[in-house]
Image (tube, rainbow, N blue to C red):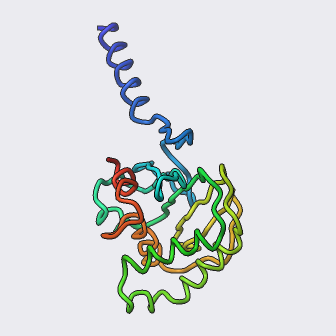
């Protein structure tokens, strides 16, 4: 009986360890969990943003509850993080332009008009980063207390952008009907 109990405990520990392993993409390691705003988040999925033939960044999406549909992820409440580790250097104009294009591709003119102040703050935060160099980490985080924040290598940049609906709008850049990269979307959805 003791052996059976010990075997069962060992199997449980192995299964738990296998479920909570670090994921590696293009040499970038994503931990299975992250803390944002005092909440423990789970790594939902990872992927690589490719533009033409260039690998731009490795991304990991951390959420309260794992889900494999964009709708389920976009409707989640509470703290969340999209973590981008740069695989090449990107200047603020290029990065900001890509974010703005992603917003335009996944929202109506009326929706964009409703987010005008937050989009201006997002652009200011990206400008404050100036250049994201190869190896830098850019986190786009949301907490109900502060809103959406851009953190460059752990340092907050620009003003916070209020509204949980705005964070969902930002996530649509990667998870919307017209994502910046279809393979990256699949990866962030856990596929």
Figure quadrant of residue 63: bottom left
Observer-nearest residue: 135 or 125? Answer: 135
> Against 64, is 168 above or below?
below
Q: Residue furthest front?
A: 53
Q: Residue at x 46, y 50 (%)?
A: 48
* Residue 60 visible in this rendered orientation of the protein: yes
Q: Position of residue 68 (x, y in %)?
A: 29, 53
* Count of marks, rendered view: 0
14 or 118: nearer the eye? 118
Q: Is residue 74 visible?
A: no
Residue at the image position 36 percent from the left and 53 percent from the top: 183
Could you tell me which residue is drawn at 43 percent across and 69 percent down?
A: 173
Residue 47 x/y as whole percent: 44, 49
Describe residue 12's horizontal placement relative to residue 86 as left or right: left
Could you say where residue 18 lies in the image, as x and y percent from the top left?
A: 40, 29
Q: Nearer the viewer, residue 94 or 76?
A: 94
Position of 34 compared to 15: left or right?
right
Give whichever of 56, 34 is nearer the camera.
Answer: 56
Q: Position of residue 109 (x, y in %)?
A: 39, 90
Q: Quadrant of the N terminus?
A: top left
Q: Is residue 190 above or below residue 115?
A: above
């Amino acid at each position: 009986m003791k052996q059976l109990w010990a075997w069962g405990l060992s199997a449980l520990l192995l299964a738990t360890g296998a479920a909570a392993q670090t994921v590696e993409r293009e040499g970038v390691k994503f931990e299975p969990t992250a803390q944002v705003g005092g909440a423990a988040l789970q790594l939902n999925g990872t992927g690589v943003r490719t533009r033409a033939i260039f690998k731009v960044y490795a991304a990991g999406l951390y959420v309260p509850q794992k889900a494999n549909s964009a709708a389920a992820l976009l409707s989640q409440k509470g703290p969340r993080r999209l973590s981008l580790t740069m695989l090449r250097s990107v200047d603020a104009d290029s990065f900001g332009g890509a974010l703005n294009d992603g917003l335009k591709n996944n929202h109506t003119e009326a929706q964009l008009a409703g987010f005008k102040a937050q989009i201006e703050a997002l652009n200011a935060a990206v400008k404050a980063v100036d250049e994201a160099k190869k190896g830098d980490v850019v986190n786009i985080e949301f907490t109900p207390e502060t809103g959406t924040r851009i953190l460059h290598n752990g340092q907050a940049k620009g003003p916070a952008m209020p509204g949980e609906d705005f964070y969902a709008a930002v996530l649509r850049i990667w998870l919307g009907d017209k994502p910046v990269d279809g393979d990256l979307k699949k990866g962030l959805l856990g596929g």
